[in-house]
Image (spheres, rainbow, N blue to C red):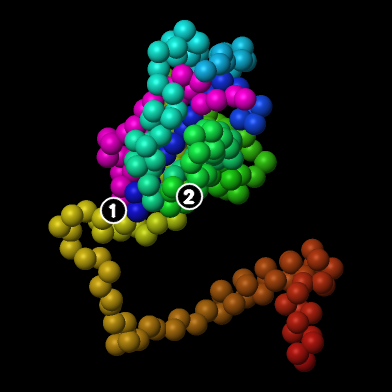
């Protein structure tokens, strides 16, 4: 499946309060590799950015005056995203703004145009509970170089997030996924019949058994005789 890593910049924090999208950056992954087929739009929001938002993204109101409205790029954007898995950090924020932009031009909600939405913030919170899970924090934790990120930018942040996502999910894929996805590579899904193999059973030696019992005795002592295996053994007896 095609995966599109997406990020937006906005005039403020409230789509329902009238804030609008000013930048969209998209990076394409196929078989977990960057393809270079990216999309990047600056948009005229029809209003000025809040002062706090300007400090985050640094995109001036004057720079956006001659940029297209969202309606002018909507078809191109939606065609690019169609049926893809879209990967977003803090998806509720970006999807909320995209839904509002689509609503304003009479289009169905964002989820109706894409295959699915994956939120890397939720993924990171599950993997690193209690830790900072901002994009910068994840870059530092996962060894992704974000030294060029002095201000937020949708395309740069999407590129960084693509690297973060690959690192977050690396352990969830078969070790041979890249070989399987390489054109012309030999199949790696052949079944191997192990029924003819007889695995030897190696019993513990007297020394190993004695060491094991000694370890159990220490645990019994530490738990005042309340270790579960002793209780279970007593119930069976």
The residue positioned 18% from the left and 55% from the top of the image is 183
- 12 lies above or below 228: above
Residue 223, position as x, y percentages in the image? 81, 66
Q: In the rendered image, which quarter is residue 216 located in? A: bottom right
Mark 2 and mark 1: Cα distance apart in space:
30 Å
220 vs 145, nearest the viewer: 145
Residue sticking out furthest to the bottom: 237
Q: Which residue is mark 2?
A: 112
For label 1, the crowd category at 10 Å Cα-Cα, with few meaning under 14, some 14 to 19 and many 20 or more, is: few
Mark 1 lies on a secondary structure that is helix
Residue 20 shows in the view: yes
* Range of magenta residues: 18-45
The residue positioned 67% from the left and 68% from the top of the image is 215
Q: In the rendered image, which quarter is residue 40 located in? A: top left
Q: Nearer the viewer, mark 2 or mark 1?
A: 2
**Sequence-wise first label, 2 or 1:** 2
Mark 2 lies on a secondary structure that is helix
Q: How many marks?
A: 2
- 216 lies above or below 82: below
35 in magenta: yes
Residue 140 shows in the view: no
Residue 81, position as x, y percentages in the image? 38, 43
Q: Which residue is mark 1?
A: 178
The residue positioned 31% from the left and 57% from the top of the image is 177
Residue 179, position as x, y percentages in the image? 25, 56
- 80 lies above or below 152: below
Residue 43, position as x, y percentages in the image? 44, 22
């Amino acid at each position: 499946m095609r995966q599109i890593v997406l990020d937006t910049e906005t005039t403020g924090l409230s789509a329902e309060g009238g804030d609008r999208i000013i930048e969209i950056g998209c990076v394409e992954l196929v078989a977990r590799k960057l393809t270079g087929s990216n999309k990047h739009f600056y948009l005229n929001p029809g209003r000025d950015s809040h002062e706090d938002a300007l400090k985050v993204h640094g995109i001036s109101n004057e720079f956006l005056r001659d940029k297209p409205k969202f309606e002018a790029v909507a078809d191109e954007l939606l065609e690019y995203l169609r049926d893809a898995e879209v990967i977003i950090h803090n998806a509720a924020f970006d999807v909320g703004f995209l839904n509002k932009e689509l609503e304003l031009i009479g289009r169905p909600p964002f989820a109706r145009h894409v295959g699915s939405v994956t939120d890397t913030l939720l993924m990171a919170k599950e993997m690193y509970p209690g830790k900072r899970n901002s994009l910068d924090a994840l870059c530092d934790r996962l060894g992704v170089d974000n030294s060029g990120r002095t201000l937020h930018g949708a395309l740069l942040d999407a590129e960084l997030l693509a690297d973060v996502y690959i690192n977050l999910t690396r352990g969830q894929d078969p070790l041979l996924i890249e070989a399987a996805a390489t054109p012309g590579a030999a199949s790696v899904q052949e079944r191997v019949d192990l029924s003819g193999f007889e695995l030897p059973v190696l019993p513990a030696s007297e020394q190993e058994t004695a060491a094991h019992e000694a370890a159990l005795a220490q645990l019994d002592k530490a738990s005042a005789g309340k270790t579960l295996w002793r209780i279970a053994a007593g119930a069976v007896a």
